[in-house]
Image: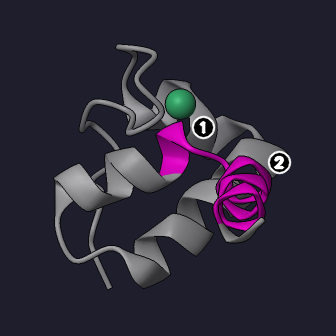
């Protein structure tokens, strides 16, 4: 699992520190934790968070149709 330090830039792209952004928000933080369990690099983590799972699923369904 990828590690995010409390003082790292938040992966949601807000530009704030993680501890002052999503770490303090249980809803957003659960999304970050989910992304961390899938991602292998910080870039992957950023992409997973930037594209919420529901949007991704919708795109996959559209491609299949
Ligand atoms: Zn954030």
Mark 1 or mark 2: which comes first in sequence?
1
When asked about the image quadrant of residue 44, the answer is: bottom left
What colour scheme does the image use?
Answer: one colour
Q: The residue tagged with tag 1: helix, strand or loop? A: helix
Q: Distance between the residues labelled 1 and 2?
A: 8 Å
Question: Quick one: label 1, few (<14), some, or many (20+) residues within 10 Å?
Answer: many
Residue for point 60% across, 72% down: 34
| Front in this rendered view, residue 48 or 6 | 48
| Front in this rendered view, residue 28 or 7 | 28
Tell me where residue 38 appears, x and y as whole percent. 43, 81
| Residue 27 left/right relative to 17 | right
Tell me where residue 4 appears, x and y as whole percent. 30, 58
Q: What residue span does the magenta drawing correspond to?
A: 49-63
- Taking the magenta stretch, the answer to whether it contains residue 57 is yes
* Quadrant for the N terminus in the image: bottom left
When asked about the image quadrant of residue 65, the answer is: bottom right
The residue carrying mark 2 is: 27
Residue for point 20% across, 51% down: 43
Q: Is mark 2 within 8 Å of ligand 1?
A: no
The residue carrying mark 1 is: 22
Q: Is the magenta stretch mostly helix, strand or loop?
A: helix
| Front in this rendered view, residue 6 or 55 | 55
Q: Does the residue labelled 1 lie within 8 Å of ligand 1?
A: yes
| Residue, far front | 65
- Taking the magenta stretch, the answer to whether it contains residue 32 is no
Above or below, 49 against 63 in this view is above
| Residue, far top | 15
| Residue 40 left/right relative to 63 | left
Tell me where residue 25 appears, x and y as whole percent. 75, 38
């Amino acid at each position: 699992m990828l590690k995010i330090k409390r003082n790292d830039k938040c992966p949601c792209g807000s530009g704030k520190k993680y501890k002052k952004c999503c770490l303090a928000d249980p809803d957003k933080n659960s999304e970050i934790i989910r992304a961390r369990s899938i991602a292998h690099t910080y870039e992957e983590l950023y992409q997973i968070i930037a594209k919420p799972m529901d949007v991704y699923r919708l795109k996959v369904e559209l491609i299949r149709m």
